[in-house]
Amino acid sequence: MPPLRVNKIMKKSSLLVCATMWVASCAPPPVAIPLPDADSPGARIMKENCSQCHGAPQPSTHVSVEWPGVVDRMLDHRTRKGYPPLSANDRTTLLEYLHKHAREVTP
Ligand code: HEC
């Protein structure tokens, strides 16, 4: 077999490998996990105020004591981006919701 033909076959098979890898890397997008108590006022406030810059986070991403700090940092992000502030009531309702569903502290 002349060297040119070998090259052609090599090229073809490496293309096939690439194509296979590309298809394999096309995993379906992750399915968003619904928020706990999705219809509660807290979840509603979260969906309305916490999903403009990233997806609304799961309350279980933090333990209870961490949430007020995170929320206040996020309210700061909101202000800097020109979003209206949360009312004191909404902030309290949101924090109660986050506390209720926060990750358990592991002993
Ligand atoms: C104006 C944009 C904006 C909005 C609205 C926003 N965030 Fe964020 N969020 C960010 C940015 C930027 C980061 C990454 C930097 C950081 O962590 O401060 C982030 C990161 C996070 C993280 C991951 C970091 C961590 O500390 O765990 C959580 C959780 C989070 N946001 C929760 C919230 C919640 C809850 C709300 C609603 C009260 C919210 N975000 C609304 C911009 C925003």
Image (tube, rainbow, N blue to C red):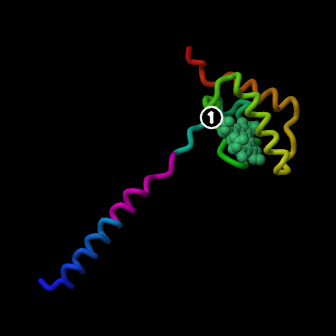
Tell me if 64 is positioned left or right of 104 in this view. Answer: right
Magenta segment includes 2:
no
Boundaries of the magenta span: 19-30
Residue 47 in view (yes/no): no
Q: Which residue is mark 1?
A: 58
Residue 100 in view (yes/no): yes
SS for dot 1: loop
Nearer-the-camera pick, 28 or 73: 73
- Establish if 73 lies above or below 16: above
Label 1 Cα neighbours within 10 Å, binned few <14 / some 14-19 / many ≥20 = some
Q: Residue at x 71, y 49 (%)?
A: 53
Q: Which quarter of the rendering shows the C terminus?
A: top right
- Establish if 6 lies above or below 32: below
Which image quadrant shows ligand 1?
top right
Q: Residue at x 25, y 71 (%)?
A: 13
Tell me if 19 is positioned left or right of 37 in this view. Answer: left
Amino acid on which the number 1 mark rests in the picture: Gln
Magenta segment includes 22:
yes
Q: Quadrant of residue 8?
A: bottom left
Residue 20: horizontal and vertical position, in percent? 33, 63
Residue 46: horizontal and vertical position, in percent? 73, 37
Q: Quadrant of residue 45?
A: top right
